[in-house]
Image: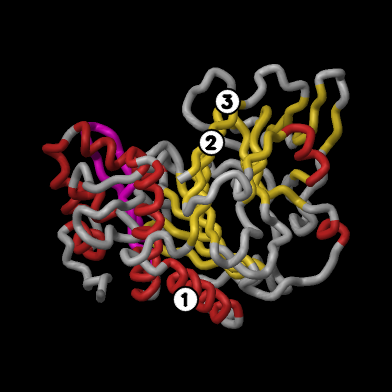
Amino acid sequence: MHESVHYLDAGGAAEIIYSKGEGVCALSCGDGFVSVLPTHPKASGRFSPILTHDVAGHVLTKIEPPFREAEADIYVARGHGAGGDSPVVTVLWFRVDVAKPRTDLRRVFARLRGRAIANASDACGEKGFVASGVYMESGLGVLAGRGRHSVDINGKTRSLPYMRSCISDDEGLLAELMCGVAHVVGRADPAMVRREHEVLIQRGHQYPRQLLHGDNFIKSHQVAIRACGGPNDPEGSDLHVDSMDGRGGAGGAWTVYAGGDAPSRFDRLAVFASATGGNGFDVRVDGLGGDWACAVHVDTAHRLHGSIWPMEPIAGGGCPRVGAGLRIVTYTLRRIELLEEAIIAAPEEEHVAFEASSQAVRRRMLGQCECIYKG
């Protein structure tokens, strides 16, 4: 395993100025030069700024796997802000076969890619938002709506999660995937994975479920799968923060980029030190070949992040095939975390949340769901 650490230059003269509320996103250089960034070509009038390749070179520190410097199965890099506080971003590049025999990640990636491609042709599918590209989401939800409930814990009202509709096989595949990723993460930094749930309701809210009791797992409430490519693909993401996301088990969320043999045009991710920009990191996440995958850990609710755009797609260009890229986003939801934190602070009231939860969530708490591991 090869590990490296990068620090932002506190005296950097260039930064991104970002404010969604004010509708401002610009490159600022210390000599007074300010350049407004372009907007997402498919944003349809929304405030949706993007970071292009030429701008990234001014404001970001590159983080790439040092393949030529060391022969290893896992490369780890951490990018810290000035002062050496908690990492702005943690990146793991790893061979897809490194988790064998525990998990065959190559097979899991292939099955998830195939499922996403098949879903692309189903415009009526519940989970396939074809107009925005191939996007499948499953796990728990917590937003208000008809039939949604809340509960009072320790004198405060907290939202109750509910199970979203999903195909049962999805969770089995995702559990295998996250077991393999947790195995890799645990080798790099055991503090970034978990083995036990602190309280019963956390087991009910975990998605995908822990594969086997005592195994490493990554805390998550929802998983989104995006298969890049196809005529409706929005391509890269804009610069944004995900304000509804939680802090996870290690202060952020993991996104897994599945290795593909076809080179990806959007192979770099920008992560900034704060929600309003500043200096940040340019992370190589894709285009590494089919034998490699990448996992990125970011506090998505408090770090501005988004794709680094090559210049040619902005003016148009060829449409890559569906599945040319694949990324799996796992994350917690802050409203669910607030309920869990309230129970940890008042464990004698856990039964209140249990009794108010839906039957589906209660079954998960008690471990009464169908077996997801079949050898």
Q: Give the extent of the magenta segment.
A: 146-165
Q: Position of residue 83 (x, y in %)?
A: 54, 18
**Closer to us: mark 3 or mark 2?**
2
Answer whether residue 149 is magenta in the image.
Answer: yes
Kindly identify the amino acid type of the residue bearing the numbered disc 3: Gly
Residue beneath the point at 45% across and 46% down: 1
Q: Label 3 to label 2, Cα distance in Å?
A: 15 Å
- Checking the image for residue 81, the label placed there is 3
Q: Is residue 146 above or below residue 89?
A: below
**Element on which disc 1 rests:** helix
Sequence order check, earlier mark of 3 and 2? 2
Sort mark 1 into few (<14), some (14-19) or many (20+) by Cα contacts within 10 Å: some
- Checking the image for residue 111, the label placed there is 1
Q: Quadrant of residue 316?
A: bottom right
Q: Quadrant of residue 122?
A: bottom right
- Checking the image for residue 62, the label placed there is none
10, 251: nearer the viewer: 10
Query: Looking at the rendering, in which quadrant would you find the C terminus?
Result: bottom left
Q: Is residue 343 above or below residue 289?
A: above
Cβ atoms under marks 3 and 2 closer than 8 Å: no
